[in-house]
Image (spheres, rainbow, N blue to C red):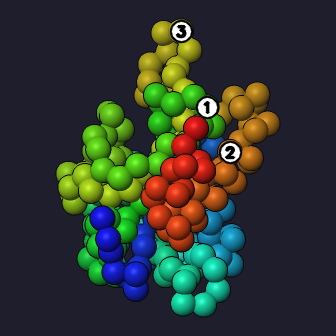
Amino acid sequence: MTTDASAPWLIAGLGNPGPEYAMNRHNVGFMVADLLAQRMGGTFKRAAKAQAQVVEGRIGPLGPASRRVILVKPMSYMNVSGGPVTSLRDFYKVPTENIVAVHDELDIDYGALRLKLGGGDNGHNGLKSMTKAMGPDYHRVRFGIGRPPGRMQVADFVLKDFASAERKELDYFVDRAADAVEALVAEGLERAQSTYNS
């Protein structure tokens, strides 16, 4: 799929607002978005046009090859992420194929990544909301969190903080996921997949 090279990208880190959710597995999208904002030298501010926080900046090499990026953290809670993302897509005139959702993924081992364009939501309520609002044809950076242990319910697992053993590697994995987002935007899906899909 070819897109207008001058069109901006919208990167939506999915999560839940509020300090009680900050270190939950479900909030890894926010963690990646925060790191990308830090790399771009920006600070999240409340969006005028949507229930979200945004940072505008650029990703990629200096000069004309860099890409304009709008980083988004929806503040509407995970299950209704689609509304704020769609409002900002329309406001910034972002093609749907230039949207990237960064989210937790149960069916991938902890810390592993999968990059893809389109597809189903695999029961993820944030993706379900986005797909209902704009269709499925956006990119996903799927951050593996693994399956719940024993008989723990999925909802309980994703809304718990990363375990102490997981936290030892969390910074590294978030850093790698931010690298993958930058590669997707700057180099395209196939090259990013060959480097980061594990």
Pick the front one: 153 or 29: 29
Helix, strand or loop for disc 3: loop
Cβ–Cβ under 8 Å for marks 3 and 2:
no
First-in-chain label (3 vs 2):
3
Which corner quadrant holds the N terminus? Answer: bottom left
Q: Which residue is mark 3?
A: 150
Q: Which residue is mark 2?
A: 173
Q: Is residue 123 left or right of residue 64?
A: left
Q: Please provide percent x and percent y for residue 101.
A: 42, 55
- How many marks on residues? 3
Q: Please provide percent x and percent y for residue 40.
A: 65, 76
Crowdedness near tag 1: few (<14), some (14–19) or many (≥20) residues, C-alpha within 10 Å: some
Q: Nearer the viewer, mark 3 or mark 2?
A: 2
Cβ–Cβ under 8 Å for marks 1 and 2:
yes
Residue type for callout 3: Gly
Q: Please report the residue visible at 20 percent of the width from the left and 55 percent of the height from the top.
A: 135
